[in-house]
Image (cartoon, rainbow, N blue to C red):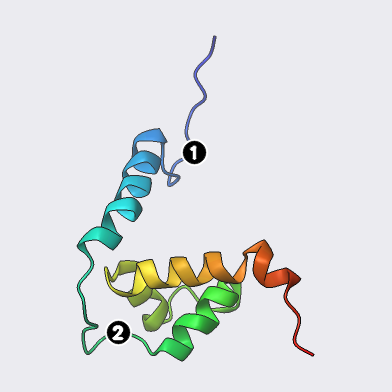
Amino acid sequence: MKKKKANPGEPGPAEDFLLALQRKVAPATAPLSPSPQCVSPDFLSAFALDQDSFDLDDPRVVHVNECSYCFPRATRLRDFFKSPVLKTMSIH
């Protein structure tokens, strides 16, 4: 059986595993308070709702993706916004 060649610039299985591991470990080691560089809760919510509408070069986006305080919060918000329970709720 032939091995599938990875495309240049794309992460391979080892990088995928390390990224997944980092995301699992980061919440356990995240600082308890934000740094002065951390983004506002409003930005974090907006980013979690629609990441595709933000420029990857935006310094706030770069920060969220690299920050051990902001990244887990953005991930949890994204998961919350996509949750089926939230979609079934309606405000009357």
Residue 82 lies, in percent from the top left, at 62, 66
Q: Which residue is drawn at 55% across and 72% down?
A: 51
What kind of residue is marked 1? Asn
**In the figure, 23 relative to 30: above or below?**
above
Mark 2 in CB contact with mark 1 (< 8 angstroms): no
Q: Distance between the residues labelled 2 and 1?
A: 34 Å
Residue 1 lies, in percent from the top left, at 54, 9
Left or right: where 64 falls relative to 37? right
Q: Residue at x 51, y 78 (%)?
A: 47
The outermost residue toward the top is: 1
Q: In which quarter of the image is the C terminus?
A: bottom right
Check disc 2 and report the residue beneath it: 38
Label 2 Cα neighbours within 10 Å, binned few <14 / some 14-19 / many ≥20: some
Residue 90 lies, in percent from the top left, at 76, 81
Residue 77 vs residue 37, the one in the foreground:
77
Q: Residue at x 68, y 62 (%)?
A: 84
Left or right: where 77 falls relative to 85? left
Picture disc at residue 7 = 1
Picture disc at residue 23 = none
Could you say which quadrant of the image residue 37 lies in? bottom left
What kind of residue is marked 2? Cys
Could you say which quadrant of the image residue 16 lies in? top left
